[in-house]
Structures are given as structure tokens and as C-alpha cells.
Amino acid sequence: MQNSRLCKLLTKLDSKDIKELNKIVRSPYFNNNPKCIELLALLLPFQKDGFIAPSLTQDYVFHQLFPNKKKVTRTLNTTMSDLIELINELRIQQKLKQKQMMRQHFLLESLLESGERKYFKTVYDKTMIRFNNRKFKNSDAFLEKYLLGMNYLAYLVQENLFHSGQYLADVIHDLDLFYMGQKLHLTCGLYSLKKLKPEGYDPVLVSNICQLAKKEQYSESSLIQLYSRAFLMISEPEVEQHFEEFLELFWGPSTDSLGKRELEDLFKIANNYCINKILMGVQKYTQKMFDLYEIMFASKLMFTGKYIHQLHLKNMIILSCKLKKIDRAFELNETYSKDIHPQYRANSYLTNLAIIHLHNKDYQSAMTYLSEIKETDAFHAMQNRSMLMKCYYELSESKAFYALCTSYRAFIRNNRKKEPQRGLAFENFTKLCRQLYRIKEGFSKKAPGELEVRIKGTSPIAEGRWLLEKCGEL
């Protein structure tokens, strides 16, 4: 049962979701299978532990639901499928609650279809008052305004009041705003990929949109202004002025009208720009990247629901360490570790402490924290072994270093199917780190410069910058 789709979906629900799901399951409007009520009540006590109880088997669940039947039948699968559909319905209803204007669009459309034109006008006027009082002017708002405009346009046609082209021009303008914003957003995503110029794609329209964005009628749209700068950053990375203009807008009050989704996407674009600049050797972008993270954390934009993803906190702590802000790194770990999902919280906290002490050259403490981590997946296990290898390297613990090299490569081979690309990157790191250590010990005749060339020419590779740094110290 633990690996069933139903249990996996239930695992993702918090207490508020469960409360709302119970309402839906008990509603005859949504649910016509009474056994779904019993199945949900039966499974919920196991949710907290992730449905891992050995007693929770398919046979157990079936006989609890159908005590008069001796043989397991497909009836259980049908009931589970019905409950999955009710969970899907919960998600739909939650989204509709969040998108009130879309609800109003559907209502207005229905009123026109049923001929309730007088009531339509009343609902429409109230809807537009609510719409205009909202602060958000993001891509959702552009779409919603266009759809509401189309509702009103249909009303004007039915009432034979469509005598002026001005309202039609306004609807077209709203559509333009939505189209321009989405075109820029999607093209930025496309250009962020490694294949910058996909075959058959002509960016001429996006270039034209960037020019149009400078016109007065689009100047008040923060979304279009930011995405036009973002596209220029990606397409012309050598012109750093684009990034500075982007930051001025991103850190300004104009972003208050944008939604979380857009701000997260724009952050990723700016973050990737900084990473590429750092890889090119422009180290001032480490501080800029740190500042971006600080803003995202302070604004709680790194949160997904109640939690922060452990990698966001880890990246912020690594940046703090690189900038020698060790006290800030400790502070971040103490402040935000409680906001990591409980399933990953303890390991995240210990991993971050190991990272901080490793950067602070307190290798014994780093190893102590690494030894306390409970490995849960192959990727994080590889990362932790790499940190341990660095500690042995720095402390010149030869016996432990070579033993780890052997066991680490065996571990990677055993988990290659789970993490093929990352596994290869860590395997290359292990090979090159071993060669580096042999040169350090004087057991290899290979020149450091020769190894440096090999490191630069190896891809994929984990911890490449650290290897080059240590190569330069030989």
C-alpha cells in the first residue's frame, strides 16, 4: 500500500487539506461511493508515518472494508480509484478558490448562455470592482481581464450595444499584454537551455516585443519590463547593463504587483545569469547572487507552502561561506532549518554544518557532522562522501582517503542507474581527486599542469572548481 498512488497522494496533504478532503468525501454531490468514506478513515491514521506500517497491506485494507468477502476482488481498486478522483477534485476546488476571477468568468459565461443578461450586468460590475481593487498585475491578471472583457463583449453583442470600437480595442490590448508576457516568459525558458538556438525557431517576434516594451502603453507593466530585460540578459550576456537594469526593477516597488510564480521564475533567470558569469571568472557576481538569495529569503519567496526546499538553504549557506560570511552561514542554518520539511530537516541541518566547518577549515568538526547524517538517497550520499574525501585530502589522512576512494567508486557503480549523470560526475571527481592526492604525496610523476588540463576537459564533473583550486596549490 505504501507505494500505491493513493498513499503517495495522501502523503502530500497537510491537516488543512485533510479537513477539506473529508468534506468532499462526505458530500453526496461529489461522492457516490460510501466506501470511500471508510477507506479514508482507515488510511489516515497511517499517514503521519508515511504508510510504512507492516500491517497496512492490501489484504488488511480489503477485509476491513469488505469483512463479508473472503477473497480480495477488484472492488478495492475501484474504491481506491474513486478516492483518488476525490483528491483530484479537492485540488481543482482549491485552485478555483485561489482563482476567483476565473470562477467569475465561468459564472458570467453561464449567465449569458441562460439568457440572464440583466443579472449578468450586475455580477459583471461587481466583479470588475473587485478586479480593479486587486494589487496583482501579473500574467494571470492579464488573462483574467481579457476573458472578463470577452464576457462583456458577448453581452454587448447580445444587447445590440456594440456601437464603438473602443471597448474592442481595450480587449485586444489586454490580450496583447498577456501574449507579450507569456511570449517573453517562455522564450526566456527556451534560451536558458544549453541549446540556445533551437532549430526552426526565429526570435524576431521576441526582439520586436522588447522594442514594443519601451513604448508608453506598456511601460506600466512590471511583468513585461522585467521579462524583456531578462530576455536581453540571456540573449546578450556580455552586455552587463541589461542585468543592472533588471536588478533595478527587480529590487524596486514594481515587483509588488507580481505573483510568487513570476518572481520565482525571474529569480531563477537572474540566478543562472550570475552562475554563468561566475563560471567565466567574474567573481563579483557571487555577491550579487548572494543578494538575490537574501531578498528571496526575506520576502519568503523561497517557501513552497510551509516549507523551504533544503537545496535553497544549502545554496545560500555555500554562498555565505564563499564570501567568508561564516557567522551569517551559521545564522541562516539556525533560522531556516526549522522551515525544512520534517522528513529532511535533521539531515539538512547536519549537512549545512558540515559545509560551514569545511569552508572554515575545521575538518574534524565537518567529519563529525557528516558521520551523524542518515543517508536517504544516492545523490545526497554522493555529496556527503565528496565532502568527506575533501576532509581526508586536507588532513592528509592517506589510509582513510584511499579506502574511501575504493568504497566510493563501488557505491557510485551500484547506484549508477538511480543517478546516471550525477553518478558519472562524482565518479570523475573521485578519479581526479585520487590523482591529485598522489601528486600531492609525491607518488605520481604527472605534472600539476597536466592534471589541470585534464580537469578542465572532463565533463560532467563534480567539484571541478575545488579540484582546480587544489591543483593550483601544488
Image: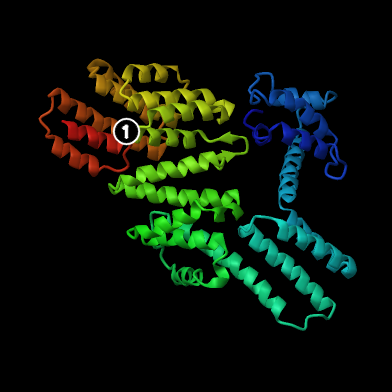
Residue 376 can be seen in this image: no
Residue 237: image location, x then y, percent: 35, 58
Residue sitting at the far bottom:
163
Which one is nearer the viewer's eye here, 80 or 7?
A: 7
User: Quarter of the image containing the C terminus?
Assistant: top left
Q: Which residue is at a point 53% across and 39% down the rendered structure image?
A: 298
Q: Amino acid at mark 1?
A: Glu
From this view, report whether residue 388 is shown above or below residue 194: above
From this view, report whether residue 84 is shown above or below residue 273: above
Which one is nearer the viewer's eye here, 280 or 195?
A: 280
- Tell me where residue 29 sits by quadrant: top right
Which one is nearer the viewer's eye here, 328 or 338?
A: 328
Which one is nearer the viewer's eye here, 132 or 153?
A: 132
Badge 1 local density, few (<14 within 10 Å), some, or many (20+)?
many
Residue 440: image location, x then y, percent: 16, 26
Is residue 42 toward the left or the right of residue 201 in the image? right
Residue 318 can be seen in this image: yes
- Tell me where residue 87 sits by quadrant: top right
User: Quarter of the image containing the N terminus?
Assistant: top right
Determine the secondary structure under disc 1: helix
Residue sitting at the far front:
253
- Tell me where residue 432 sits by quadrant: top left
Residue 80: image location, x then y, percent: 74, 36
- Number of disc labels: 1
Residue 63: image location, x then y, percent: 78, 24
Q: Which residue is at a point 55% across and 60% down the rendered structure image?
A: 222
- For label 1, the residue is 427
Q: Which residue is at a point 40% across and 60% down the rendered structure image?
A: 242
From this view, report whether residue 134 is shown above or below residue 443: below
